[in-house]
Image (tube, grey):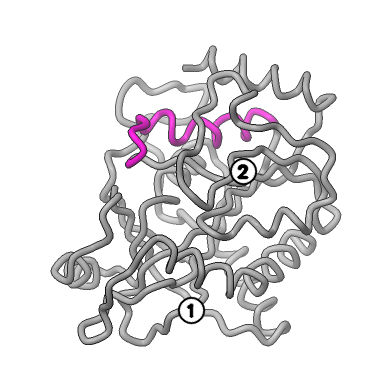
Amino acid sequence: MLEQIRSTTENIQAATNNFNPEIGIILGTGLGGLVKEISVEFVLPYESIPNFPVSTVEGHSGKLIFGSLGGKRVVAMQGRFHYYEGYTMEQVVFPVRVMKHLGIRTLFLSNASGGVNPDFEIGEIMIINDHINLFPNPLIGKNHNELGTRFPDMSEPYDHRIIAKGHEIAKRLDIKVSEGCYVGLTGPTLETPAEYKYVRVIGGDAVGMSTVPEVIAARHMGLPCFAISIITDLGVPGKIEKTTHEDVQRVASIQEPKMTLIMKTLVSEL
């Protein structure tokens, strides 16, 4: 695995004239519009990158974008990889490890999720302050000390300082945001009413099929993380309705400009 990470990193560096990003960004379903705010210098389709998986999900375009955002050098994944696509956990988190080797010092993530907090509404923007991992852990197997310790601390999976700054920026921009715990499930089925109830009982505010593995891998390598979730449907008793992937994309796209503004401002003020 380490050899693959090094090989992929070297290939990307050769293709981008040794572009050295400070911040990595992973964009979720229907949330790729942040790329429009990046002053793009290089675009690498995933299929052109050695050892990279290829995104198969509608709404995930599959490109690695290099450029500047808010005065910072960034690398953005326009489309992520999911366990439900048939990839191993090692493949799902491989891009995060490559971004770390490219030089990033902070990881930003976004996703679309189902809300189980009864106070939430469709379109709610939730800053993630914690998570519950119901995926196979991506660190299972041989530990590579070059990446991180065998038993990484997870007492602060999402950086408290950046979360506070995110709230400050949202208030300044007059954008309503909430804060909560994200529960990661494998998918690809959307949750049953009983599963929504279970997620709420164990302490979740939202549930989705991504983000958690990438954050675990990032924290293993010592990267601070910040994540935003857009609530695209509700798993609250009495409010559960039939939901399609197209519904998720539609709601995410409506709220995307607000999320983009928060992210862009936060990047610039880090």
* Residue 81 image point, x, y percent: 46, 40
Q: Residue at x 84, y 39 (%)?
A: 41
Work out whether mark 1 precedes mark 2 in sequence or the reverse, and give the earlier one.
2
| Quarter of the figure with the C terminus | bottom right
Q: Which residues are magenta?
A: 84-102
Q: Amino acid at mark 2?
A: Met
Task: Give percent across and percent down for residue 169.
Answer: 69, 76
Image position of 268 with respect to 39: above or below: below
Residue 72 is inside the magenta segment: no
Residue 127 in view, yes or no? no
Q: Quadrant of residue 17?
A: top right
Q: Which mark is residue 124?
A: 1
Q: Residue at x 51, y 43 (%)?
A: 80
Residue 124: x percent and y percent? Answer: 48, 79
Classify mark 1: residues with Cα within 10 Å, few (<14), some (14-19) or many (20+).
many
Left or right, 40 with respect to 224, comes to right
Which residue appears at 34% of the width and 72% of the height?
Answer: 205
Does residue 245 appear to the left or right of 41 in the view shown? left
Of helix, strand and loop, which mostly describes the magenta segment? helix
Residue 89: within the magenta?
yes
Disc 1 marks a residue whose amino acid type is: Glu
Tell which of 228 and 245 is nearer to you. 245
Label 1 close to label 2 by CB (< 8 Å): no
Q: How many marks?
A: 2
The residue that disc 2 covers is: 77
Which residue is depicted at the point 82% across and 45% down?
40
Circle 2 Cα neighbour tier, 10 Å, few/some/many (<14 / 14–19 / ≥20) = many
Label for residue 26?
none
- Using the numbered discs, state the Cα–Cα distance from disc 1 to disc 2 in whole angstroms: 23 Å
Q: Is residue 132 above or below residue 77?
A: below
Residue 219 percent location from the top left of the image: 49, 43
Mark 2, secondary structure of its residue: strand
